[in-house]
Amino acid sequence: MSIGEKMRANGWKGLFGIDIVVEENSGKVYLIEINARQPASTTYESQLQTVLVVNRQPHPNPPLIKGREYVLSTFEAHLKALLGENLSEYTLVPIPSGAQILQRVTKDITDVSIEQISAIRDLGYNVIVYDERKIGVELLRIQSNASFIQAHNVLSQKGSEIAEIL
């Protein structure tokens, strides 16, 4: 039984996130936490999905999805699940790629300069800056429609560009 099926059987509705660790040598996956709430990635994921569906119709859209299925963003599916609606006829809009990086305030990183923010924006990334300066709170969020990594611990070209600036 999958984690989602188990949570549904126990009465949970809507989105949830999971935290896992992967044993490096064996690749075995261990579940360490279930966050029964909307994950932080949902808003941006839903924005990417919405951009992909131009003139989306509230009824079946055969050119986009096979058969007579409806399409939803992740956030729309979350709301419908919380309202107890049947989602069996719906499909999530697939996202080919996308990423966001969060920089939190740490004892060593308390600010990002306007020059750094401008340089990242000049590369075409969406940058959201937060005014909080408490340790552990988000300082910066960088969003892209492409991945920042190409493999575990290996930055993509886009990831390297950001790392050089920061």
Image (tube, rainbow, N blue to C red):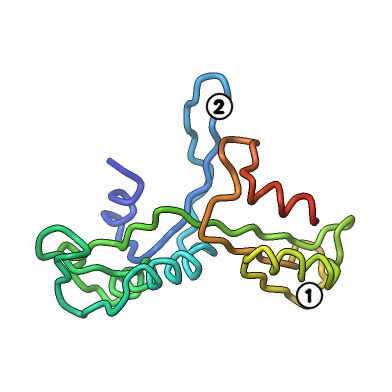
Residue under the image location 29 percent in, 57 percent down:
8
Asked whether, in this view, residue 74 is left or right of residue 161, the answer is left
Q: Nearer the viewer, residue 162 or 133?
A: 162
State the separation of the CA atoms marked 1 and 2: 35 Å
Give residue 139's position: percent from left, percent from top.
75, 68
Q: Residue furthest top?
A: 25
Give the secondary structure at mark 2.
loop
- In the displayed structure, 58 sits above or below 63; it is below
Give the secondary structure at mark 1.
loop
- In the displayed structure, 137 sits above or below 148; it is below
Q: State which quadrant residue 87 falls in.
A: bottom left
Q: State which quadrant residue 112 falls in.
A: bottom right
Residue under the image location 33 percent in, 51 percent down:
4
Q: Residue furthest right?
A: 108
Residue under the image location 31 percent in, 49 percent down:
6
Give residue 5's position: percent from left, percent from top.
28, 50
Q: State which quadrant residue 125 falls in.
A: bottom right
Give residue 26's position: percent from left, percent from top.
50, 20
Query: Which residue is under mark 2?
Result: 23
Asked whether, in this view, residue 155 is left or right of residue 114, the answer is left
Query: Which residue is under mark 1?
Result: 132
Q: Nearer the viewer, residue 143 or 38?
A: 143
The amino acid pointed to by label 1 is Glu
Residue under the image location 78 percent in, 75 percent down:
132
Residues packed near mark 1 inside 10 Å, few (<14), some (14 to 19) or many (20 plus)? some
- In the displayed structure, 140 sits above or below 54; it is above
The amino acid pointed to by label 2 is Glu
Give residue 13's position: percent from left, percent from top.
33, 65
Asked whether, in this view, residue 38 is left or right of residue 79, the answer is right
